[in-house]
Image: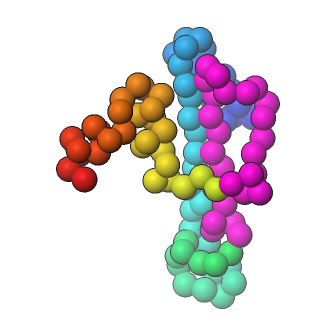
Amino acid sequence: QSVDAFVRDAAAAAGAGAYVFYTSDNGYHIGQFALAFDKRQPYDHDLRLPFYARGPGLPRGEVRTADDGFMLTIDLLPTFLDIAGVDVAEAREFLGG
């Protein structure tokens, strides 16, 4: 419930035309599976992370899962640049790669 309240309040403060993104880290599992302190393991809760987006043009209440296709963290910067109207190729050149 606290995440819902935060997203609602952030969206209200940002205004109707703003996008709000929320994601989280999976954290460390300590002692689970008799493995060392780490987060890079081949278990489902290490691979799947929450990601929520809200903003103009995004369908309200739509839920997508891994069955719909994967989203990787490397997808975030190009997505944010596209929303901002920045040409991704020009940004790549500016960023040196």
Q: How is the image coloured?
A: rainbow
Q: Please tell me whether residue 43 belongs to the stretch shown in magenta.
A: no
Q: Residue at x 29, y 45 (%)?
A: 92
Q: Residue furthest top?
A: 16
Q: Residue at x 55, y 84 (%)?
A: 36
Q: Is residue 50 visible?
A: yes
Picture quadrant where residue 64 is located: top right
Q: Residue furthest bottom?
A: 34
Q: Please tell me whether residue 61 belongs to the stretch shown in magenta.
A: yes
The magenta stretch spans which residues? Answer: 44-69
Q: Does residue 6 sit above or below 22 in this rendering? A: above
Image coords of residue 33 (percent x, y):
69, 84
Image coords of residue 15 (percent x, y):
55, 11
Image coords of residue 11 (percent x, y):
59, 20
Total labels drawn: 0
Image coords of residue 26 (percent x, y):
60, 60
Q: Is residue 9 visible?
A: no
Q: Does residue 39 sit above or below 13 in this rendering? A: below
Relative to residue 97, is residue 28 drawn left or right? Answer: right
